[in-house]
Image (tube, rainbow, N blue to C red):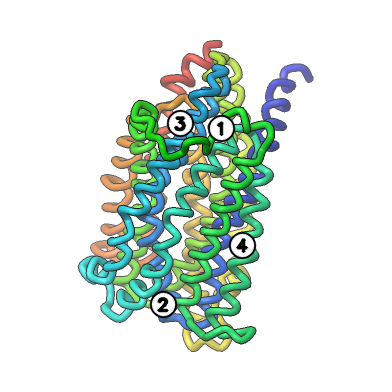
Amino acid sequence: MPALTPYAAHARGLLAIGLPLVGSHVAQVGLHVTDTLMVGWYGVDELAALVLAGSFFFFLFILGSGYGIAVMGMVASSLGRGDEVQVRRETRMGLWLSILFGLVAMPVFLWSAPVLEALGQEPALSAMAQDYLRIAGWGMVPALVVMTLKSYLSALERTQVVLWVTVAGLAMNALLNWMLIFGNAGAPELGLRGAAIATAATQVASAGLLASYAAWLPAARRFRLFQRFWRPDWHAMGQVFRLGTPVGLTGLAESSLFIAAALMMGWVGTVELAAHGIALEIEAVTFMVHLGLSNAATVRIGRAHGERDAEAMRDVALTATALSLAVVAAVVVMFLAVPEAIIGLFVRPDEARVDAIVDFGVRLLAVAALFQVFDAMQVMALGFLRGVQDTRVPFWLAAVSYWLVGVPASYVLAFPLGLGGIGLWLGLVVGLAAAAVTLMWRFWAGAGRLAAAA
């Protein structure tokens, strides 16, 4: 069937780049899932504090990760044009901006309890969350460095090393959690603080491994990435800043929808907040599949954009969308078929509130199945747009969708209409649907429209 040949070729190309990235993203989320799972077995109050602390850390991480994410599309486009000098300039300044952001964020972690209390959280939980963040916050700089180097290596289509480094980090985190949370193998029993130490140490090790590989890789030595690294390149920094800041704000607009839901879920109750954290971790794992495919689409569309190949841009976008929708179908079946077994993995069987947590978590997974398609389509659209370096307008579309549509919908459905925690998650559906429609329209009405005419 000759008509399918271009799509089959693009599917192979997307999967070759995307599958290792999917594995890497799943393993990365596995770090947080491991923390949630082990801390959940340690205690429900500690789990609720971890949900708050994790949301707080993630809020700042997403904002700072925009510079690293922007590097992916920029480097892919520069490679498509054959501009090797620009590859080095963009990546290096992406690293500079990531490091600077991480350093600026540290004071916020050190004094996070007053912020959480001002947002309506219980003082005891806020204090526990601050204890976690005062340790885990030291992992922000290496975590952002990892994001930038992952983007650089992905643009070079060297994604397998990203996968193996992340899997090694997952194993390291699980071992350190087992030792430091529960006091196994002669280690002190540190509970929530032990989880923070494990996470920060894993991020430092991952950054070191990826930096070493990027410096060693024979095929990339011509870029001289770390040669005279201390020298600023103000023009390239400005380019990365202008493209990356809207990327970070776009991610923040999306993630803050979920963070706002977590904060409001804290107003509903501790059991509901714990179930929310569990269900969100599960949803995050499945979302990583779409994110990996979206990253692959960014690289492939970025290359085609640099080569001025409009037909390839169109075909990559259509193929990536079809692959993502196939994953959606499989995830929906899983969420609806075995929700109790999935939620039950995260709570100790003898926990007094286990039945209430599992019951509420099952109901949340039913709603998560409902918004799977919208979540997938909005992240795919963002991947397409980043491939053509279109980030400013997508930020405003995302901000309107999540903050002017999603957050108010969550609040109204949960409290004035009395739907509680389920209403919060239904509001997420509304916000994600608005984002999916408007961002897909942005691509196909802009660069995608030109590609479709090719």
User: Label 4 amino acid?
Assistant: Leu
Q: Circle 4 sits on which residue?
A: 170
Q: Residue at x 30, y 53 (%)?
A: 104
User: Which numbered disc, 3 or 4, marks the residue that appears first in the sequence?
Assistant: 3
User: Label 3 amino acid?
Assistant: Glu
Residue 235 in sight: yes
User: Which numbered disc, 1 or 3, marks the residue that appears first in the sequence?
Assistant: 3
Q: Circle 3 sits on which residue?
A: 90
Q: Write down the quadrant of residue 440 in the picture.
A: top left
Residue 282 in picture, x, y percent from top left: 54, 61
71 and 45: which one is in front?
A: 71
User: Label 2 amino acid?
Assistant: Val
Label disc, if present, on residue 187 of the rendered structure: none
Give the farthest residue toward the right.
Answer: 1
Q: Are marks 3 and 2 in contact (CB under 8 Å)?
A: no
As helix, strand or loop, the secondary structure at mark 1 comes to loop
User: Which numbered disc, 4 or 1, marks the residue that appears first in the sequence?
Assistant: 4
Viewer-nearest of discs 2 and 4: 4
Q: Residue at x 54, y 43 (%)?
A: 149
Q: CA distance from mark 2 to mark 4?
A: 27 Å
Give the farthest residue toward the left.
Answer: 118
Say which quadrant the N terminus sits in.
top right
Q: CA distance from mark 3 to mark 4?
A: 29 Å
Residue 107 in picture, x, y percent from top left: 28, 61
423 and 303: which one is in front?
A: 303
Q: Circle 1 sits on which residue?
A: 224
How dense is the environment of label 2, judged by Cα within 10 Å: few (below 14), some, or many (20 and up)? Answer: many
Give the farthest residue toward the front.
Answer: 228
Q: Residue at x 45, y 76 (%)?
A: 193
Q: Residue at x 77, y 17 (%)?
A: 2
Viewer-nearest of discs 4 and 1: 1
Label disc, if present, on residue 271 of the rendered structure: 2
